[in-house]
Structures are given as structure tokens and as C-alpha cells.
Amino acid sequence: MEGKITGNASRPQDEGYQIIYSNNTIGGVSGGAVLNENGEVIGIHGRGEQKLDPNSPGEFKTLPTGQNIGIAVNTFLRLGLVDVGVKAPAVQVAVAPKADDFLLQGNEKFQKKDYQGAIADLDKAIAINPKYAPAYTVRGIVRGTALKQYSEALADFDKAIALNPQDAYAYMSRGVIRAALKQYPGAIADLDKAIAINPQLVEAYAVRGGVHGHFKHYPEAFADFDKAIAIDPQYALAYDGRGRVRILLKQYLEALADYDKLITINPQYAPAYALRGGVRNELKQYPEALADYDKAIALNPQDAAAYINQGLIYYENRDLETAINKWQKAITIDEQLAEPKLALGVALYTQGKPKEGLELAKTALRLDPQLVDLEYLKKNLWGERLRDDADKLLQNPQIQPLRKTDTIRNGDEGTPRRDDGKMRRFRDRDTLRHGG
């Protein structure tokens, strides 16, 4: 794969890494040779640098920055670890750090989640060489994905692109940030440009597929996710995105296959279990769905949504006590969640505790007025039994004034209170991609 050296530190950094190069790599090539245009070995591939992608539920997911790092062959020669029939050059005299040194150090600190330290090193790289495009790209990634400094990140990507209009990763990264900011036309334009420059840039297809999915441009979304998978069959994000689109289209068996594959690739990715649990719930595979939610909770004990979904299944199977316990646990995790309060209120009302049930229902409806809509509840995996019991509670005269109010105010603040997007149909605390 063709690329170029973007940095060559004057001395090795941690683990011996010294050179930075821009060509795409795939997983499993650590230890492979890095060749120059003459076919000569100049280094050993170490690892691909990572950036964080704001597509993961409640956190960030790693994606390449386009800056791979390797160990210069001279380092191995000095250590006697590589025999290529030549001698290592004499040890160099110490020199002042170069911009390349600080870029490599910044990358290293980014990997170790020392974000402020990474920014400090990248600032130094830029101070030494204000026209050093890779430093702006990497600093933009740190600012935009790790620190959520979106304006500063966009400025860095703008500068990187001005210095190097062929920097596909800068366009892609700017597209990611624009999508996170819901600047969708600009995001699509950036991702289109990134793909035009580098048609093998798998991440750009996956992100663009998510934006297409947000706008219900499903054929285009499928085409992008399929292309990403064709480029890299182990690229988990593409299966995730395609699975979400299939869920929206009620293609549950196909979605199940995508999440099976995703979990095979990354068995530690908690949202995949939550999403697969939702699919299995729709397919009425209740024991399997409960097992998936258990796994999601084991990986992320603060996943209130998984507890909510488990409660819905237990309620449909007439196990009210377990359902109540699950919803109480969800409320303990996040007291501002409206849905488990309404579900708990319905359960208590059904158990012959009308006072407690009605109070919880009123609180829930003030938090989220949409909960009065039984069709809305159905879309959020409420089963027939729970919806029927909810309808009985919602017919109570004490609830009627709340049902007639389009926007229910909370207290004296005069502002609507919502679940802030935490109640999703399949509840992995994420949108389809980037969007609200």
C-alpha cells in the first residue's frame, strides 16, 4: 500500500517507535516491513494510530488517524535484532527535538489518554513548523473526539486541508465532527472528498453510511456499509451501522446476523448485546434477549436501558416482581429517566397500589409527554400486556389533564423536561449514527 513518511523523529520514543507514515494498514500487520520506493526495508510496522469516533453509545470508538508508527530499522540493527547484511550507522550526536519528535510524542500520549499532554506536544510541533499539516490533523482529532472542543478541532482540520488539500484523513475527521454537530451537508461533502482522494478509506464509508441512514437514504446507507465491509470484513462499525438500518426497516433476521458478526469481531462491545437483545425481543426470543441484556449489563453496569428492557420482558411473562426490580434499578442509575417511572407506576397500579402508581405516572409524564401515546410505547418495545395495563392507568381522571397538555411543564422553570434522548427503541443510548 502506497504512502509516505510524514515524520521521522530524531530519536526513538516509547517502545522504539521513530517513524510516522501515512499509508493505510489493516489489522494483523504489526511486525511487517516498511519499504521505501526502492523496495528497501526502512522500518518495522508497529501499530496504527487511533482516533476516537463519536458514534459509540455514550463514549467514543477508536478509528485510525492515518498516522501509523514504526520502528526505524537502524534501531533494530543497533540492538542486533535484525540481520539484513548491513551495519548500523554510527550513533548520532544528540540534536534539538524536531517537529517530528513532538508529533510522535503527541501520538503516544493520545494513545495513553493523556490528552492535555498530547495537545502540548502537538502545539510544540506546530510552533517549530507552522506548516506541518499532520500535526494539525492529529491535534484536531484530539480536540474534537477526546476533548469535545469542536470549534478548535474544525479550525485545525481547516488548516491541515489548506496546507495539504490531499489529506483524506483531515477531510474525514472534519466530516465526523460536522456530523456530530448535525452539520450534515458539510459532513457529506467532506466524506465525499475523503473517499474521492482515498477510495479505500473504510472509515469514511461507514461514517457516511450513518449520515445517509439518519436521513432515511437507506439504499445509499446500505451501499456505504457494504463497501466498508468489502474493504475490511473485520470492520465492526460497518456491521453496527448496517444493523441499525436493518432494525429501522424491520429486517430483524438480517440485523441479527450483523450483530452476531459484530460480537464475533468485538465480544467486549456492550451496545452490540443491547441492540441484539432488542432484535431478539422483536422476534420474541425472550430467553436469548434476556441473556443479551445480562451481557450488556455485565460489560456496562450503568446501562439503565438494558434493565428497562429486561423489565418489559419480565412483565409480558407475568413476573411483575422481577420487572419492578429491574425498573427500580434503572431509576437508581438515572433518576431523570421517565420511562421506567411510568412502567413502575403501571405495575404498582395493577398491583392495587393506585396512589403510588399515579404519582409515578404523573412524574413520568411531566418528564416525557410522549409517554401518553400507546403507539409510541409500542415502538419502544412495550408489550401488549403492559400497554393494556398502561391504558387503564392513563384513563384515570387524575391523568386526563396531563394527556390533554401538548407540552407539560415541570415546576416553575417553564421548560419542558424530556428523557434527553435516552429512551430509544432499542435503547443502546445511541442514535442510528450521529443524528438526534
Image: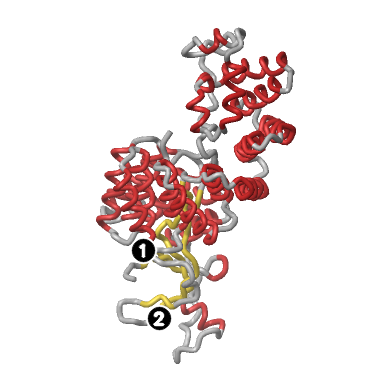
The quadrant in which the C terminus is found is: top left
What residue is shown at x 52% (from left), y 42% (from top)?
282
Q: Position of residue 426 (x, y in %)?
A: 52, 40
* Vertical position of residue 435 compared to residue 410: above or below: below
* Disc 2 from disc 1: Cα separation: 26 Å
* Observer-nearest of 249 and 147: 249
Label 1 sits on a secondary structure element that is helix
* Vertical position of residue 385 compared to residue 283: above or below: above
Q: Position of residue 380 (x, y in %)?
A: 52, 33
User: Mark 1 is on which residue type?
Assistant: Ile
* Vertical position of residue 296 compared to residue 423: above or below: below
User: Mark 2 is on which residue type?
Assistant: Val
Q: Quadrant of residue 231?
A: bottom left
Label 2 sits on a secondary structure element that is strand
* Observer-nearest of 173 and 416: 416
Instruction: Locate residue 214 relative to residue 277 in the image: left or right.
Output: left
**Residue 123 can be seen, yes or no:** no
Q: Quadrant of residue 363?
A: top right
**Residue 289 can be seen, yes or no:** yes
Q: Residues within 10 Å of mark 2 (few under 14, many from 20)?
A: some
Residue identified by numbered label 2: 41
The quadrant in which the N terminus is found is: bottom left
Residue identified by numbered label 1: 231
Q: Position of residue 15 (x, y in %)?
A: 57, 69
Instruction: Give the mark nearest the N terminus, 2 or 1.
Output: 2
